[in-house]
Image (spheres, rainbow, N blue to C red):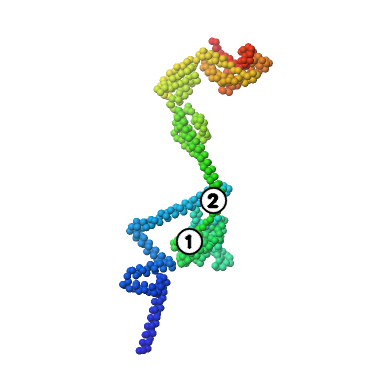
Amino acid sequence: MSDNGNRLTEESLNNQVKDNNELGELSELRSLLLGIDPPKLHRFYEKLDNPQVDAEDISQMLPEAVVLRTMQDEQLSEAMVPTIEQAIDSSVKKDINVLSEAIFPIIGPATRKAIATALDEMLQSFNYALEHSVSPQSLKWRIEARQTGKSFAEVVLLRTLVYRVEQVFLIDKHTGLILQHLVASQVTSQDPTLVSAMLTAIQDFVKDSFEVQKHEGLHTLEFGELTIWIEEGPTAVLAGIIRGNAPEDLRFVFKNTLEKIHLKFGREIRNFSGDTEPFVVSQPYLKACLESRYTNPNKTRYIYAWASIGLLAMVLASWGFFVNRDNRRWDNYVKNLDAQPGIVVIKTDQRNGKYFIAGMRDPLAVEPQQLMKQANLNTKTVVYQWKPFVSLEPQITIKRAAQLLQKPETVTFKLEQNGVLNATGSASRKWILSARERTASLSFLGITKYQDDITDLDFDQLNAYKKEIEQVIVLFENDTTEFLPGESEKVVKLVPKLRKLIDASKTLKKDVLIEIAGHTSTAGDKQANIKLSQDRAKRILIYLGSVGIGRNNFSTKALGSEQILRPELSEKDKIFNRRVSFKVIIDDIAK
């Protein structure tokens, strides 16, 4: 009995020690989880086991426990995420205004910060382009931009670059799969999976082909302007694609980032099975690696930049002035052209530096090229597309009637509003009678009646022209063919008189000959005077030919000093003898 009692007592003591040990271990575990010392934890659980415990006691313990647990790691935060998400979802479904009012104070600053960041990147690109726009290397960079298809600002950024981390890859070391990938702004990204596979293949090739230690790896690759830095960790690899010459200090940034990622996501990387979603939150760490540095331009480059802006402004102002001037000239020309009788402008256009006009034009209307010269426009820049038509405008009708009736220059037509065509002036009787007989053929022009008040051209008119011409004398300098001052005007005024005489003689079907006689004073050698008088007559004949009067109706005659106009009693008399006179001969004029 005593032995049994001793055994039971010993067994009870062992069980109690065992229970005490288990409670001690459980207490220690709870202390580690919640960060509460064992006595306080024991009192906490006593209150939890007591059904009479009040909420106030628990509320005093929970905040301290949550704070202490949060300071140790983020497991409590991760455990609370689903609950918080469900609470937010319920709040939004119940009343969206509660959550919107709560986050309203942060929406504005966040939006402004995003806009400010975008503007800062844009201004940085613009400033670099502006500062180097007229630098000595700008021409070379512009050629490069045209050849590569990049913008000038992008080329400037690349050529003023010290270094820039353009892409960062987080790669699983064992599978070679990409975990996360970040790209700097304004950088064209390649397929990150291909890049990851390439790096893994190169690493394996080096390890398999060369005698390297197991823990050693490839740290740097160079491809033209790009350099790839590789940092290896126990379970992940961090690779950065760098343009330019990066300092060695940047490697510490890579290493620090890789250490943080292993510390934060070590378990996730070890358990990686292809799902990259858990590693999205690693982007802030990777973003710290996207560093860049550019050369600071000299202040003097601003002078070039502002000079470039000024020059560009002057060029644009000049271009705008000439464009505006040409547009005004073109508009005025189109309006003037459309206002011309016999022309209807339907459509105008401007393409590739040329003007196009489409419309209708009567063959008797004014030539558009003549108006272009008046408007100071280049005739080669205008393309016309005219369709012919018969205009019934008064000016065109008069031209067409004059063409059909072969109106002489001495007759003038005038068309009244009621369609009556009036003819005035002078003409031969034959033409007058012919015009009266042919007026019926003008009805298609809208002419309802023809009236004339025309003077017949007769021999008296012809004699009047003859008399006016023969009264003209042209005086010359001594021993030369040069006119005296004011004498050239006499020759100019003589031209229309000669035209009328010739036209009248043709109308009357009479031949007319105008004899140009040269004279000299009595001084000097006789033969020399004959030649001088001949040269003076030819001087007049050449001028008449230059203004379009045919020489068939003219002849010259050298009289020298044979027919002096005045006795040479004074120098003034000699001047009147140094002359050219005219004589008109009309066949059968006496009849």
Q: Nearer the viewer, residue 416 or 390?
A: 416
Identify the residue shown where x is 55% and y is 53%: 295
Q: How many marks?
A: 2
- Judged left or right of residue 11, residue 221 is right
- The answer for how far apart the CA atoms under marks 1 and 2 are is 29 Å
In the displayed image of the protein, which residue is found farthest to the left?
52
Vertical arrangement, residue 366 with respect to residue 505, above or below? below
Residue position for label 2: 156
Which of the two labelled residues, at mark 1 and mark 2, occupies the earlier sequence position?
A: 2
Determine if residue 422 is in view.
yes
In the picture, the quarter occupied by the C terminus is top right
Q: Position of residue 481 (x, y in %)?
A: 63, 20
Q: Is label 1 in a helix, a strand or a loop? A: helix
- Judged left or right of residue 97, residue 552 is right
Residue position for label 1: 285
Q: Position of residue 138 (x, y in %)?
A: 56, 48
Vertical arrangement, residue 480 with respect to residue 320, above or below? above
Q: Position of residue 322 (x, y in %)?
A: 51, 37
Q: Are marks 1 and 2 in contact (CB under 8 Å)?
A: no
Amino acid type of the residue that numbered disc 1 sits on in the rendered structure: Tyr
Give neighbour class at mark 1: few <14, some 14-19, many 20+ (Cα, 10 Å): some
Vertical arrangement, residue 39 with respect to residue 276, above or below? below
